[in-house]
Image (cartoon, helix red, strand yellow):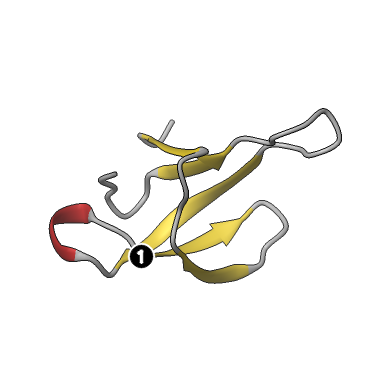
């Protein structure tokens, strides 16, 4: 996975009761766009994130 500051990180839900989560990449701490990322989630929470296989990166809209 590779991201840039300003990209959107999307984590898909595994079941119908789990919702999709989206956030903005604020900081890339790995080399060449690799994780971990500091992300601001839709609810305003910010945190260090190591995305799993259910996540993907989208360019900013």
Label 1 crowd (10 A; few <14 / some 14-19 / many >=20) = some
Question: Residue at horizontal 54%, vertical 71%?
Answer: 47
Q: SS at mark 1? A: loop
Residue pointed to by mark 1: 36
Q: Left or right: where does residue 29 sit relative to residue 40?
A: left
Give whichever of 22, 6 is nearer the camera.
22
Quadrant in which the N terminus is drawn: top left
Instruction: Report the residue that reaches farthest toward the left.
Output: 32
Question: Residue at horizontal 82%, vertical 28%?
Answer: 16
- 38 above or below 22? below
Question: Residue at horizontal 79%, vertical 39%?
Answer: 18
How many numbered marks, from 0 up?
Answer: 1
Task: Residue 10: give x, y in percent of width and height.
Answer: 53, 39
Task: Residue 59: give x, y in percent of width and height.
Answer: 35, 34
Q: Left or right: where does residue 18 sit relative to residue 26?
A: right
- 20 above or below 9? above
Task: Residue 14: give x, y in percent of width and height.
Answer: 69, 35
Residue 40 found in image quarter = bottom right
Quadrant in which the C terminus is drawn: top left
Task: Residue 5: give x, y in percent of width and height.
Answer: 31, 55
Q: Left or right: where does residue 4 sit relative to residue 9?
A: left
């Amino acid at each position: 996975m590779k991201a840039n500051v300003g990209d959107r990180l999307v984590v898909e839900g595994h079941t119908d009761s789990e919702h999709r989560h989206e956030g903005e990449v604020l900081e890339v701490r790995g080399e060449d766009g690799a994780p971990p990322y500091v992300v601001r989630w839709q609810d305003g929470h910010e945190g260090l994130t190591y995305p799993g296989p259910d996540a993907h990166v989208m360019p900013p809209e």
